[in-house]
Image: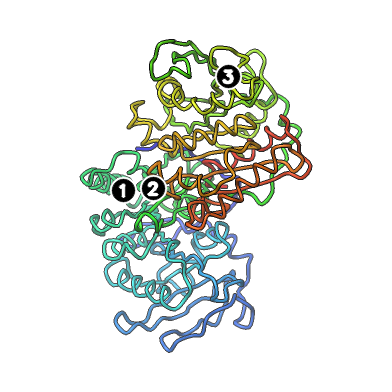
Amino acid sequence: MKKRLLLLLTLILCFSVTACTSRGGQTETQSLAQSDAESRPEKTVQEDAGSRPEKTAQETEGTEIYRDFRVDNVFHSDSEGDIHYNIYIPETYDGTKPYALYFTLPGYGGLYFQGVAANIKTEEFGFEAMKYNEEMIIVAPQLNDWGETSADQTIALAEYFLEQYNIDRDRVYGSGYSGGGETMSLVLGKRPDLFTAYLHVSSKWDGAYEPVIEQELPVYLAIGRNDEYYGSEQTQEAYNALYALYEQKGFDKEKIDGLLVLDIKEHEYFTQRGISNEHGGGGLFARDTEIMGWLFQATKEPSHGGSINASLSGTVPAELEYIPDKYKSPSEHPGTLEKLTYQTWESFSYEEKTQELTKEAWVYLPYGYSENQEYNVFYLSHGGWSNETTTMGTDQNPRSFKHVIDHAIEDGKIQPLIIVLPTYNNTSGRDSGDYSLALRLTDRFHNELVNDLIPAVESRYSTYAEDTTQEGLKASRDHRGFGGFSMGSVNTWCTFRYALDYFRYFMPMSGSYSTDGEYMAELVKESGHDSDDFFIFAASGTDDFAYSAFKTQIMAMGSVSDGTFRFADNEADGNLSFLEREGYVHDAIASDEYTYNGLRFFWNREQ
């Protein structure tokens, strides 16, 4: 089971919790929405609730607005009868652009006989979802049970929205809380193809497993260990069953972990947030950015024949963020720098292995590093006239950029990760000062990197690699990145060319490789990978002497007609981004700022 970090909620969780009677005579706490809901009055139908398409004869529109949701709409299905639902449509929706779609099914307290809009008045999933995508329609059905009838009605309603609205079929999300989870599991046992990813909250699985496996639908199972209504055992059993079926399909752990997540929360998770009842406390998951971020970062990947990929990274900002001044001083929770010594071979005779070398790299470990946790790894190459200590320093003499990373992790801007600082210097520490020699060494560095350095690092430290065989390193490529500034950028492009099997993320900065975009696309094709298998975060400064050639390369890559490179600010929509800083030159200030921004994107999907 993949270990997952629990993110501290920064939202103020000051709310009152009351109890309501659930089916079977048991009690579960009402949603955390109550105190919010009481402070927001309902609106009349005349108030704007966003642009809506023309209503069909099968649809009766609701007459009231509650917190931007139009409530008690009715879809008159020929086969499934009247289906009540509440809906949020962004004001920007006009039908000309496809929007994402999210279905959230409630627990017992939100069923229709509990009262109009009882679901959105007692649960926050729909409202919290608005924070993740401004271009998403949110549907909150109010059904009458948690069985087959409600499952069939959910399917009919989903089909209706996919037909009548302009929906991005690659971004259709679902969640089910308590009884709603039972219903959604039945839905997925029949029509998993309707959805992109599913969040199963404080519930049990009633539906068939096999259709989910066949569709390779990402599923996140979240529950309290001592859930008062279901317990956690049934959720564990569902996870085990799904996992076993994926194994029978031949999937390895890395691939299964990308599709299936089990998140059983200990009691402290709830009590630390002022909740004592774990089942009712499932409403907290709506405000957990790790859980909800997982759901809304998932997207279907058409070029993989409809397979599913849950993106690991967040959104590239529109502009580079300046490094806060305080980040340049030591933090209260510093990480550590360790020197790693490893054996390799002289670069130009590497294949012959006639001259063995002992080399050093420095390794940054985040504050609180634990062997019981898996970490993403970023390999950061120095530029010309430099070595492995240039960027972050040593344990005895850390550079300011080490403090920057400490602070950024401390403040939650960068996820805890391992940073490896190697050198492409060969037989002399002065090799990188010879421009022509440095070019040739970066072109050869991939041999040492893949065969010697990565195994030395990832056999010693806790990473996502199950082992350091070639197969193990390839399987964990999504959790590995490479970047560098100046000649380190050239080294990054060489790594992209020769080692795409082992790395997903690349951060070239102010250093070009080829201004022929078609040639760069051909390198991808030769590697056996496609456009969905990598992301490039590129940056430079307008007064940098390398800026012109570097930007020309990036623009040429983005202009390749076959779509090998697609400009985007996230992994779902593309694989290439370029940011520039007005007036920045070719120096350490620029290098540090670009790297800081890139690491805020890599593996930071909740941001």
553 relative position to 585: left or right: left
Nearer the camera: disc 3 or disc 2: 3
* Residue 566 image point, x, y percent: 53, 54
User: Do tag 1 and tag 2 residues touch (Cβ < 8 Å)?
Assistant: yes
Q: Residues within 10 Å of mark 3 (few under 14, many from 20)?
A: many
Q: CA distance from mark 1 to mark 2?
A: 8 Å
Q: Is residue 412 among the parts visible in the rendering?
A: no
Q: Could you tell me which quadrant the N terminus lies in?
A: top left
In this rendered view, identify the residue nearer to me: 18 or 82.
Answer: 82
Specify the amino acid type for callout 2. Ile
Q: Is residue 393 among the parts visible in the rendering?
A: yes
Residue appearing at x 37%, y 72% in the figure:
143
Specify the amino acid type for callout 1. Thr
Specify the amino acid type for callout 3. Leu
Task: Give the label on residue 235, or none.
Answer: 1
**109 relative to 256, above or below:** below
Classify mark 1: helix, strand or loop: helix
The residue wearing badge 2 is 223
**388 relative to 7, above or below:** above
47 relative position to 141: left or right: right
The residue wearing badge 3 is 337
Q: CA distance from mark 1 to mark 3?
A: 41 Å
Return the disc, 3 or 2, that comes first in the chain's sequence.
2
Q: CA distance from mark 3 to mark 2?
A: 37 Å
